[in-house]
Image (spheres, rainbow, N blue to C red):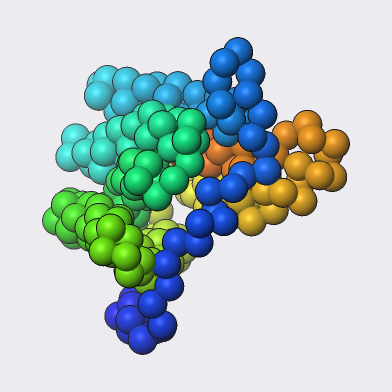
Amino acid sequence: MAGVGGVFAFLPRFAQPQSYHSFADQRSYIGMANFGDVASNLPFAVIGFLGLGFVVRPASGRFIGPRERWPYFVAFAGIFLTAFGSSYYHLDPNNARLVWDRLPIMVAFTATAAAMITERVQLRAGLLLLPVLLLVGIGSVLQWNASELRGAGDLRFYAGVQVCSTLVLLIVLLFPARYTRGSDLAIVVGFYALAKIFELLDKPIFQLDGHLVSGHTLKHLAAAAAGYWLLRMLQKRRPVTDLASS
């Protein structure tokens, strides 16, 4: 991780391109600007709400220890708030609003990484790293926003945190699972990767499907699917020790 951080530290500073805010589907509907990119955030609110309800509800066999719930609680809170932050941004895309889109996404992302460390590496390590990862993730967004306000936009820290968090999710998959449904984590990562591909192909997808749906709208749906699969994993899994003793 330190090596990845070093690579980004030595990269030339790069700002947020203003072209990023020019999304393919800018159609309005029922008086709502950019309807497709705004409305496609609704699944985040639904999945985040259901996830929060599941985590706080006693669910025998789903968590070996009650403290394992906390990273997931924060992750689903981030998913829920993403619906509002992303909708606010897409109603009028610009740098000032983008910060409110990225903050809850980073909360969800870093909390999920902490949850995986808690379950696959060590409970204490994951819980101790949860506030650290949250502060680093939120700090990367605020640092980028401050750099833009100074007229010297710098995305390196934010991009580096995203890459390192993704690497954490992939690395922890190599550790033994304490629960069943461990393969579901690979599907969660797969949906996230698909979301990034849809984001990059925003305009080509919009042109190829006859302006039916844009790549960015599909990005929201794929990212929400990642959150849903995370919740589905929690709902269906069992501790491996239960299977060993049965």
Q: In this rendering, would 241 be left or right of 70?
A: right
Measuring from the top left, give residue 169's x and y in whole percent.
42, 59
User: Considering depth in this image, is 127 or 193 the residue closer to the camera?
Assistant: 193
Total number of numbered labels? 0
Rendered-image quadrant of the N terminus = bottom left
Q: Which of 46 and 52 lies nearest the eye of the viewer?
A: 46
Examine the rendered structure and indicate whether residue 43 appears above or below residue 10.
Answer: above
Q: Is residue 186 at least partly visible in the picture?
A: no
Residue at the image position 83 percent from the left and 39 percent from the top: 209
Q: State the residue in front, 47 or 105.
A: 105
Residue furthest top as drawn: 30
Residue located 19% across and 55% down the image: 135
* Quarter of the rendering containing residue 55: top left
* Residue 209 against residue 183 in the figure, above or below: above
Locate residue 160: give its quadrant.
Answer: bottom left
> Quarter-wise, where is residue 51 in the image?
top left
Q: For the point 32% across and 20% down, which residue is it?
A: 53
Is residue 232 shown left or right of residue 187?
Answer: left
The residue lying toward the viewer, choosing from 35 and 111, is 35
Residue at 47%, 35% (x, y): give it.
92
Give coordinates of residue 73: x percent, y percent: 27, 34
Locate the C terminus and report the quarter of the image it occupies: top left
- Whole-percent x, y for residue 101 in the image: 39, 42
Residue 74 seen in render: yes
What residue occupies the far bottom of the structure in this picture?
A: 10
Q: Position of residue 123 (x, y in %)?
A: 21, 53
